[in-house]
């Protein structure tokens, strides 16, 4: 059967065969629950999750405890935005984001508006980038969060994360970035870029669908987050639910391959 050439890789990508291969044993042979602490099946799964968490943390210069697994970037964005809004109510009810964000950022913000929060939706310049002086002017004493994406899913522009991080620190406001289109493609460093929360997903970089993560800074400053899913207290209480071991293994493998192949892959894409 004739299949059309696929040109929609910002919507999703096929899975890399090497990712699938890494995942397969965790569906059948090593199927344990990583939270089962009293037997081998649990320990095997726990070891795989631990390794995946380490790979993700290393990829963004974070520590493993700062990685909270989610079902994807949509959930990570919701957890970051609504979780911060709820946890920092006593500080204020104002958020800043950008008009060109993904709906998974815009819609949680619109939802917060219905609850009485105020959101500034900054426009972008002709080149698609945030105007830093406009951002600076938007800060208010009651601002609790700035959310600006790393790489745009429609036009590909890379926002100046480090400069935005600097401004947020100066104003003592948390900085969240949706890095769904950036992880595995460009270098990301939560320390040098002063990022407090970062949303990630696997399926834009040849990983499986249905897995992502939220980086949540634990020191300088320690970010507080109201969980949006309550239950067994997984992921430091921030996101309950049995961890999806095969997806986590696949996510980590995709990120690892992405980083390894970043220089040659960037070159290939530029040529295309
Ligand atoms: C794809 C995408 C999302 C949604 O990610 P899911 O993992 O599919 O929920 C969020 N933000 C951006 C920028 C994206 O490209």
Image (cartoon, rainbow, N blue to C red):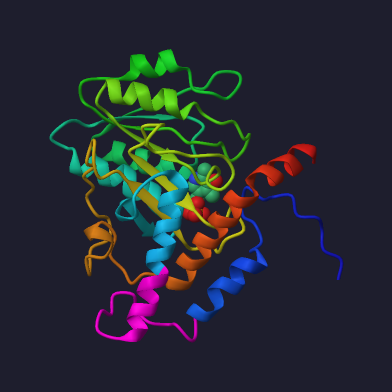
Taking 54 as reference, is 234 left or right?
A: left
The residue sitting at 47% across, 36% down in the picture is: 149
**Where residue 128 appears, x then y in whole percent?**
57, 25
Residue 213: quadrant of the picture: bottom left
Magenta range: 27-48
**Residue 64 magenta:** no
Check the picture and name the quadrant holding the C terminus: top right
143 shown above or below 255:
above
Q: Is residue 244 visible?
A: no
Taking 112 as reference, is 134 left or right?
A: right
121 shown above or below 126:
below
**Where residue 99 appears, x then y in whole percent?**
48, 29
The residue sitting at 40% across, 57% down in the picture is: 54
**Where residue 267 appears, x then y in whole percent?**
73, 40
25 shown above or below 187:
below
Q: How many marks?
A: 0
- The residue at the far left in this view is 90
Q: Is residue 129 visible?
A: yes
The residue sitting at 56% across, 72% down in the picture is: 22
The residue nearer to you, when weighing 115 against 7, is 7
**Residue 41 magenta:** yes
The residue nearer to you, when weighing 4 against 192, is 192
Check the picture and name the quadrant holding the N terminus: bottom right
**Where residue 161 appears, x then y in whole percent?**
45, 29
- The residue at the far right in this view is 2
The residue sitting at 41% across, 25% down in the picture is: 164
């Amino acid at each position: 059967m004739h299949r059309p050439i696929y040109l929609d890789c910002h919507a999703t990508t096929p899975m890399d065969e090497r990712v699938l291969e890494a995942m397969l044993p965790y569906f059948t042979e090593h199927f344990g629950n990583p939270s089962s602490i009293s037997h081998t099946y649990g320990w095997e799964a726990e070891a795989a999750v631990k390794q995946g968490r380490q790979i993700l943390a290393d990829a963004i210069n974070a520590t493993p405890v700062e990685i909270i697994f989610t079902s994807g970037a949509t959930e990570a964005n919701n957890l970051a935005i609504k979780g911060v809004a709820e946890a920092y109510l006593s500080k204020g009810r104002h958020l800043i984001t950008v008009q060109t964000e993904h709906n998974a950022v815009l819609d949680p913000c619109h939802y917060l508006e219905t609850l009485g929060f105020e959101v500034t939706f900054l426009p972008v310049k002709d080149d698609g980038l945030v105007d830093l002086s406009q951002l600076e002017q938007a800060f208010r004493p009651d601002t609790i969060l700035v959310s600006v994406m790393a790489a745009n899913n429609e036009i590909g522009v890379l926002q100046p994360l480090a400069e935005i991080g600097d401004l947020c620190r100066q104003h003592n406001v948390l900085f969240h970035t949706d890095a769904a289109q950036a992880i595995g493609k460009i270098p990301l460093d939560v320390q040098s870029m002063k990022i407090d929360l970062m949303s990630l997903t696997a399926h834009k970089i040849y990983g499986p669908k249905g897995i992502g993560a939220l980086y949540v800074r634990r020191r300088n400053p320690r970010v507080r987050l109201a969980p949006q899913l309550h239950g067994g207290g997984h992921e430091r209480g921030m996101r309950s639910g049995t961890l999806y071991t095969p997806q986590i293994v696949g996510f980590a493998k995709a990120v690892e391959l992405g980083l390894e192949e970043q220089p040659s892959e960037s070159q290939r894409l530029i040529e295309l």
